[in-house]
Amino acid sequence: MNERPRIKDVAKRLGVSPATVSRALSGSGLVAEPTLSRILDVARELNYRPNVSARNLRTQRSMSVLMVVRDIGNPFYLEVMKGVEQAAREAGYSVLMGNTENDPDRESEYFDMLRDGHADGMILMTGKLPARLEAEGLVGGLPVVVALETIEDSGLPHVQIDNFAAAQDAVRHLIELGHRRIAHITGPLPEGMSTLRRDGWRAAMAGAKLPVPDGYEQLGDYQLHTGQVLCGRLLDLPEPPTAIFCANDESAFGAVHELHRRGRAVPDDVSVVGFDDIYLSEAIFPPLTTVSQPRADIGRESMSMLLELIAGGKVALDPIVMPTELKIRGTTGPVAKPN
Amino acid sequence: MNERPRIKDVAKRLGVSPATVSRALSGSGLVAEPTLSRILDVARELNYRPNVSARNLRTQRSMSVLMVVRDIGNPFYLEVMKGVEQAAREAGYSVLMGNTENDPDRESEYFDMLRDGHADGMILMTGKLPARLEAEGLVGGLPVVVALETIEDSGLPHVQIDNFAAAQDAVRHLIELGHRRIAHITGPLPEGMSTLRRDGWRAAMAGAKLPVPDGYEQLGDYQLHTGQVLCGRLLDLPEPPTAIFCANDESAFGAVHELHRRGRAVPDDVSVVGFDDIYLSEAIFPPLTTVSQPRADIGRESMSMLLELIAGGKVALDPIVMPTELKIRGTTGPVAKPN
DNA sequence: GACGAAGATGAAATCGATTTCAAGCCGGAA
DNA sequence: TTCCGGCTTGAAATCGATTTCATCTTCGTC
């Protein structure tokens, strides 16, 4: 039953005051040499570490930030998190993960944690704000950065990609391959990010004067299984598409799976494009053509913006836009000869 | 600039003492009726929430636990985490994620967080203890539960599966399909979990009196890319295997990918078995035959054990063993006719 | 009607650090 | 020699809650 030592134990041991120990350990440069190293030695020897609750209470900071995502099971967030964590560690912060599962209660719970002093700031990767907070106008001024997603009129700084342009490019790639019947499996609408990708698809179609028949826009939710089901619906249309642009990789996986299941060749019968370039996209067969985002960079950038905010600095409200890249792999190919 | 209200603000507003407010809010049943609801009302109205640092300092508990994994990028842990989180929330705890990337410094950092009062307990999913702590014997008695992995002689309670038996079963399945040349891509040896799976493979081979030629055991590290490279080595052997048992799904993905790349049919030319049943295993083509673990259950079970430990209860040191299931899907089939 | 028990509340101590404020000491300048 | 300023250091205040201990009612019982 080792009792954890407290600061006064270290102080007593050397006959100095707790104040001096605190100053020595914080590297403030206020402690003179013979004392300084003796304190450091004893602290190490006793394995002393300051109690965080006491420190946080006194300093009014927790030195940790919250990173809130809609589904922690989605590998898409993991690399972002790595970027966040890395930048956080460099600044002496630790990162707490929050998972909302699209549950509004849980979303506002994380805002509460912020106000409780659990964390000093928050990186939000969900598509919307808890209604309760939005109504009460409690959000403005909080140290919160929105990453990946877009939350209109939130007054919060954003770090994101140009979802519209990237989607447009992806669809244009299909058009260049000769496809004319191009369907889209969306994310959850009407959230910002999903909407932008959908609009990018529409714009590319309109730009090439291609029609968008009824049923070519299927409302999805970024999930694998949903992608599979919706792909089935598309194939059952009287005039099924020859290419499918999916709002994210997981629904694209679902689509490819359904195509395999029905014995349709990818990409010879149907081409598929995803979005996000999650880490397994290259590993499935055939490797997925998809839009790659600089996830770790987005994480790092969000975190450094957040640190700026926490430090009380002002941050530009114009979104920071990171570059994307269309990775052309194995699921897209020239359109099959029209029947 | 809304100032967060403190407990004394609520108290003053009603002309009661902070003590009474605290008692009312904690649901202690010590506050009489007219006062009680007035306090609750005012607290809600002011949007008062107790400061966690102050509370933690006084109560000497943080009401949060640490879940430490070796690679947060591995989807394998995500469902475990969901189980942990669910059980934690039910008990009023929140979960902090820690990521070691197999870095010993970071591993011991999380132990430090435990001692700092950052968390009340820890669920460890890494294969070993930080050497520093092990040497100093600082681990015994800490509220720590090891999940999934096995850490020998650590004196810590374990929640795990029978890795040996499950691996043996998986390999027997291949043997029943007629395979005799069965190779293995291991995890990082000599860690507990990887060793057990390797030994299960060996035992199954020995049990069927099958030889294990040189080079049939390839040292991996659970990573996709490594699985791909090692699969290539196996195929380059003078007598390549007809089946490969991989220590986890990600290396199995790598192996399948390499087989596709070389134009070898799965499972007609080579069968592949994975381990873990991560959420995309079913979505790749062909769907992966693999050993499924009850991940969420393992998470829940670990958490409830941890709560027991935190509450000061004694916990059996015999590992708790959860059931596994071999999911036979599309990557295993009868052995091809011998040439 | 008096006494004891139970119930409601407040005052003050407490958790463990950091930080303010004050004091002591020393050296250099006038 | 005296005074001032700069280092070091310590005593005590502080952060915001919870909890102990004490006080004061109130009610029931004999």
Image (cartoon, coloured by chain):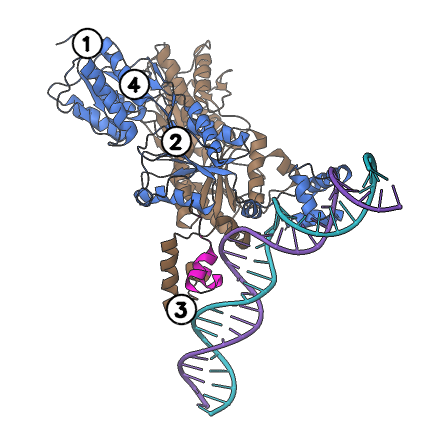
Chain colours: A blue, B brown, C cyan, D purple
Of the pair A207 and A10, the residue shown nearer to us: A207
Q: Nearer the viewer, mark 1 or mark 2?
A: 2
Of the pair A46 and C27, the residue shown nearer to us: C27
Q: Mark 3 falls within which chain?
A: B
Assign a secondary structure to mark 4.
helix
Alpha-carbon distance for marks 4 and 1?
A: 27 Å
Instruction: Return the disc, 2 or 4, that comes first in the chain's sequence.
Output: 2
Q: Which residue corresponds to mark 4?
A: A165
Residue type of the residue flagged with mark 3:
Ala
Snapshot quadrant of residue B277: top left
Residue in the image at 31% along x and 38% along y: A102
Q: On the picture, is C29 further left or further right than B150?
A: right
Alpha-carbon distance for marks 2 and 4?
A: 20 Å
Assign a secondary structure to mark 1.
loop
Q: Nearer the viewer, mark 4 or mark 1?
A: 4
Alpha-carbon distance for marks 3 and 4?
A: 62 Å
2 and 4 marks in contact (CB < 8 Å): no
Q: Which residue corresponds to mark 3?
A: B32
Q: On the picture, is B317 further left or further right than B4?
A: right
Magenta residues span: B3-22
Q: Which residue corresponds to mark 2?
A: A157
Q: Picture coordinates of residue B122 (x, y %)? A: 51, 42
- In the rendered structure, does residue B16 fall within the stretch colored magenta? yes
Local crowd at mark 3 within 10 Å, few (<14), some, or many (≥20)? few
Alpha-carbon distance for marks 3 and 2?
A: 47 Å
Local crowd at mark 2 within 10 Å, few (<14), some, or many (≥20)? many
User: Which part of the image, by quadrant, shows the N terminus of chain B?
Assistant: top left
Residue type of the residue flagged with mark 2:
Pro
Instruction: Return the disc, 1 or 2, that comes first in the chain's sequence.
Output: 2
Residue type of the residue flagged with mark 4:
Ala
Q: Which residue corresponds to mark 1?
A: A336
Q: Which mark is residue B18?
A: none
